[in-house]
Image: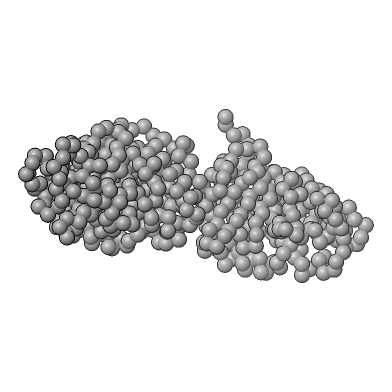
Amino acid sequence: MTDRLQRVSTGVPGLDEVLDGGLVAGRSYLVRGAPGSGKTVLGYHFLTEGVAAGERTLFVNLEEDEADARANAASLGFDLADVDVLDLSPSSQFFAEDRSYSVFASDEVEGEEFTGRIVDRVADVGPDRVFVDPVTQFRYLTSDDYQFRKQVISFMRFLEAQDATVMFTSQGGVDSSDLDLQFVSDGIVELAHDGDTRRINVPKFRGSDKQSGDHGLVIRGDGLHVYPRLVPGEHRTGFTTEPIESGIDELDELLGGGIERGTITVVSGPTGVGKTTTGTQFLAEAARRGERSAVYLLEESAATFRQRSEVVDIPVEEMEAEGDLVVETVEPLSLTPEEFASRVRREVEANDTRVVMLDGVRGYRVSLQGEREDLVRRLHALGRYLKNMGVTVVFVDEIDAVTGEFRATNAGISYLADNVVYLRYLEIEGELRKVIGVLKKRVGDFERTLREFEITGDGIVVGDPLTGLRGVLRGEPEFVDSEPGSTPDVTSGVRRRSDSRDDRVE
């Protein structure tokens, strides 16, 4: 159904998307949150967006004097020169004494003067937008909560009668609840912050759809930025499920022809075993096909990634120069999961990027802001979104143990994966050797053996299947002779046992 309501932009990047197009014109909205959460900054956005749209705006300032308000706004790049400011801050005579005032019905001279200033300014300006910061200061003008609520309702109705869209802030707390204001408002925007993590939520939005749940919020030098929570089901495109080759015949044989388009592959293994290089091989093959890829580095620098790739004959810098690859480094704790997802979305949708690699999953949990369980859910949502868009996804996950008992992943994300490719070290006669295998593949068949794996100056080398090897997943590799007295080609120094069982990986 088409939304026939007139919308008013908040001026905050991303927030209008959460609000299904913006605020509904002519209604009142409560912005609540603790000190420092960004309430007044949101008001600056609201007012200056109105000025940019050619609207008349009024700032009813009840907390700091006008000079400070304009200076604080300017420090964030907001010019309030064309915003009409009514300074009713505590420094004025109206809050100098502990008295009881009524905004629109009082016989006291001071109350009438206070009322007159508001009414006169509204009449003079005829505002399309009004920002009141904070409306909870009105509590000092009333004798009890009932009078406060009655006063605020009268105030809001008066402003709405002028066809103004109203935004007002509160600082509700244990000693001073703003529950009455929540009932009065047509919508509520909640801002919260815990250390470096900021969130925004819209629990109430009367007469309109909205995006529910918490969303990412960042305050920078230019104000607020909102990053809506990624909902995978809202994004989908048609694509053909087809095998995506790695460019290495033996690896593709292991994978039953490659990994399918629109699937998630987890490449896991201990440090230094070759996980990132294996994932990058798929990016190189995508470039050869003329497809664009993106890699997000959460555990190493772009310079290191480029240098290491060039050493093993993967031309990352050439791929970047041709526009076939974008390399992004994610600084620790610099992004919310929603902001990171927004970056990935922009890359995919603006550049038709077909392969995305995230290196690595542990770095995602460490580098992005949030609780571990919440981060896993956000990673799941990102993966589902990419799959729905037909993007081939590679997640690189580091396993703690170098040898010993096998673990598919270290972050508990195997359920996200359509394919699990694992690399392992094997200790064979005192030497560490590398092997590669496939643990899981949802689409199509795969080779259920291990192959020796090596990284050379010419790239990745994958050997023939290691038949007769078992016990790798237990961390106790051993060879089983297929015929009495035979010796495997891989090594002559491993325990061998004659056994009638089939040669297979346990």
Q: Position of residue 47 (x, y in %)?
A: 63, 55
Does residue 426 appear in the picture of this structure?
yes
Q: Residue at x 8, y 41 (%)?
A: 484
Please state which of residues 405 and 282 is positioned toward the viewer in this rendering: 405
Task: Point out residue 415 in the picture as x, y percentages from the top left corner.
Answer: 39, 41
Count the numbered circles shown. Answer: 0
User: The C terminus is located in which quarter?
Assistant: top left
Q: How is the image coloured?
A: one colour
Residue at x 57%, y 42% (from the top left corner): 212
Location of residue 440 by image quarter: top left
Is any atom of residue 314 visible in this view? Answer: no
Name the quadrant of the N terminus: top right
Query: Residue lying furthest top in this view?
Result: 1
Residue drawn at (23%, 46%), measured in percent from left and top? Answer: 471
Residue that sits furthest to the right in the current view: 107
Q: Is residue 201 left or right of residue 174?
A: left
Q: Is residue 283 left or right of residue 500?
A: right
Closest to the observer, 229 or 430: 430
**What residue is shown at x 76% (from left), y 44% (from top)?**
161
* Residue 412 location (% of width, % of height): 40, 48
User: Is 489 or 142 nearer to us in this picture?
Assistant: 489
- Residue 493 spot, x, y in % from top left: 12, 54
Q: Is residue 235 left or right of residue 210?
A: left
Q: Is residue 454 positioned above or below 348 on the image? A: below
Above or below, 64 against 488 in this view is below
Question: Does residue 69 lie above or below 411 as drawn?
Answer: below
Residue 405 vs residue 424, the one in the foreground: 405
